[in-house]
Image (cartoon, rainbow, N blue to C red):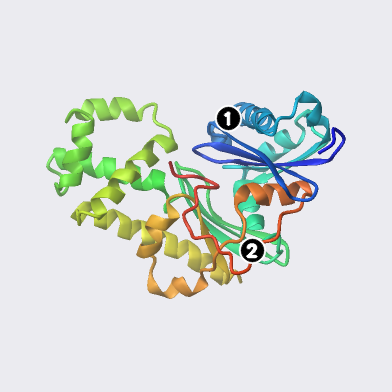
């Protein structure tokens, strides 16, 4: 690689972490790095800081210095980037790169999943959740409006529902189970401690408790089973909404997807297809780069921890 070669950097800014990948003009992998959450709902300034940090770290991982920034074309997908005013602020960002293109994280995940094809969709199930697709290059968004009002089929919402149920169970309002006892033990069987924790908790903090739900599903815990069934129903509704809009080839993505897929309702499973590349490679396509060819018969399973990640 020469010191004048064009570089392409793809950044996937998710709710749990921000991941970068660098490729050369031929698509060869040069470097990768990970930083903290880059969800725009946590603040645009925080998102910009994480993007800048992971960009520098990725170039460093490739053994490149600061001079490489000027010949690097960057594509970025950010979680929560659905508000038009936020997009304008970020697109006016004074950056040092050769070029910069920014979309929401679902867009780059969709580009990666379908290798840049202009038709197809994804269902992201990670810390957050949403459905997204392209119909003749026209974007379609279903859900993904953030933890407070949306993201029903997500690790964060499953974790939050588990804590709500455990709190109510300790008060004698809801069913007690081994899982609810385990969750309350984590907070010292103190409702007050859980409430104080919640005052500063982020979606990624709630998503950590989705791990507990998954663990107790394997133990046939009745509350854990109920919560995952509800999550599967939410995810199925999003898949139906995409199909209604003409998107009938949908790849599941996100680190919580593999746990939710068994709970999808029977009528939506025929919509599912394997993804081809991940969100960071989708961001490289957004930046104008190319990708290495897939090996014959190569398929990604769902649940790869990319794009709106879980854990």
Which of the 4 image quarters holds residue 11?
Answer: top right
Viewed as shown, does residue 250 lie left or right of 112? left
Secondary structure state at the residue bearing disc 1: loop
Quadrant containing the C terminus is top left
Please give the name of the residue rendered at 67% of the width and 56% of the height, measured from the top-left corner. Answer: 111
Viewed as shown, does residue 130 lie left or right of 78? left
Mark 1 is surrounded, within 10 Å at the Cα level, by few (under 14), some (14 to 19) or many (20 or more) other residues, namely few
Extreme residue in the left direction = 172
Q: CA distance from mark 2 to mark 1?
A: 40 Å
Of pointers 2 and 1, the one earlier in the residue sequence: 1
| Rendering coords of residue 202 (x, y %) | 43, 33
Please give the name of the residue rendered at 57% of the width and 72% of the height, measured from the top-left corner. Answer: 248
Q: Of residues 168 and 176, which is closer to you in this image?
A: 176
Check residue 295 in the rendering and tell me which mark sits there, or answer none.
Answer: 2
Q: Of residues 92 and 210, which is closer to you in this image?
A: 210
Check residue 171 in the rendering and tell me which mark sits there, or answer none.
Answer: none
Q: Of residues 54 and 1, which is closer to you in this image?
A: 1
The image shows residue 219, relative to residue 194, as above or below, that is below
| Rendering coords of residue 255 (x, y %) | 46, 49
| Rendering coords of residue 3 (x, y %) | 85, 32
Which of the 4 image quarters holds residue 119?
Answer: bottom right
Viewed as shown, does residue 83 lie left or right of 215? right
Q: Of residues 294 and 209, which is closer to you in this image?
A: 294
The image shows residue 277, relative to residue 1, as above or below, that is below
| Rendering coords of residue 115 (x, y %) | 68, 60
Check residue 43 in the rendering and tell me which mark sits there, or answer none.
Answer: 1
């Amino acid at each position: 690689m020469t010191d004048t070669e064009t570089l392409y950097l793809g950044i996937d800014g998710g709710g749990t972490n921000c991941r970068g990948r660098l490729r050369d003009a031929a698509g060869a992998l040069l470097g990768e790095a990970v930083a903290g959450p880059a969800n725009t709902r946590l603040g645009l300034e925080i998102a910009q800081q994480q993007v800048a940090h992971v960009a520098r770290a990725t170039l460093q991982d490739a053994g490149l210095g600061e001079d490489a920034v000027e010949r690097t074309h960057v594509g970025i997908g950010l979680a929560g980037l659905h508000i038009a005013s936020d997009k304008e602020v970020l697109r006016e960002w004074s950056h040092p790169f050769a070029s910069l293109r920014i979309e929401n994280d679902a867009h780059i995940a969709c580009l990666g999943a379908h290798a840049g094809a202009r038709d197809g969709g994804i269902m992201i199930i990670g810390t957050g959740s949403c459905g997204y697709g392209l119909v003749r290059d026209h974007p379609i968004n279903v859900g993904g409006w953030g933890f407070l009002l949306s993201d029903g089929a997500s690790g964060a919402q499953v974790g939050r529902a588990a804590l709500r149920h455990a709190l109510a169970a300790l008060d004698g309002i809801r069913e007690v189970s081994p899982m609810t006892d385990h969750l309350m033990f984590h907070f010292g069987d103190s409702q007050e401690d859980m409430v104080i924790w919640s005052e500063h908790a982020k979606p990624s903090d709630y998503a950590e408790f989705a791990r507990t739900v998954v663990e107790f599903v394997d133990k046939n815990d009745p509350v854990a089973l109920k919560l995952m069934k509800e999550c599967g129903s939410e995810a199925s509704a999003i898949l139906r909404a995409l199909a209604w809009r003409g998107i009938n080839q949908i790849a599941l993505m996100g680190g919580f997807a593999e746990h939710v897929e068994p709970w999808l309702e029977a009528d939506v499973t025929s919509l599912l297809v394997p993804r081809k590349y991940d969100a960071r490679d989708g961001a490289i396509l957004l930046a104008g780069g190319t990708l290495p060819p897939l090996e014959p018969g190569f398929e990604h399973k769902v649940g790869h921890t990319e794009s709106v990640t879980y854990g």
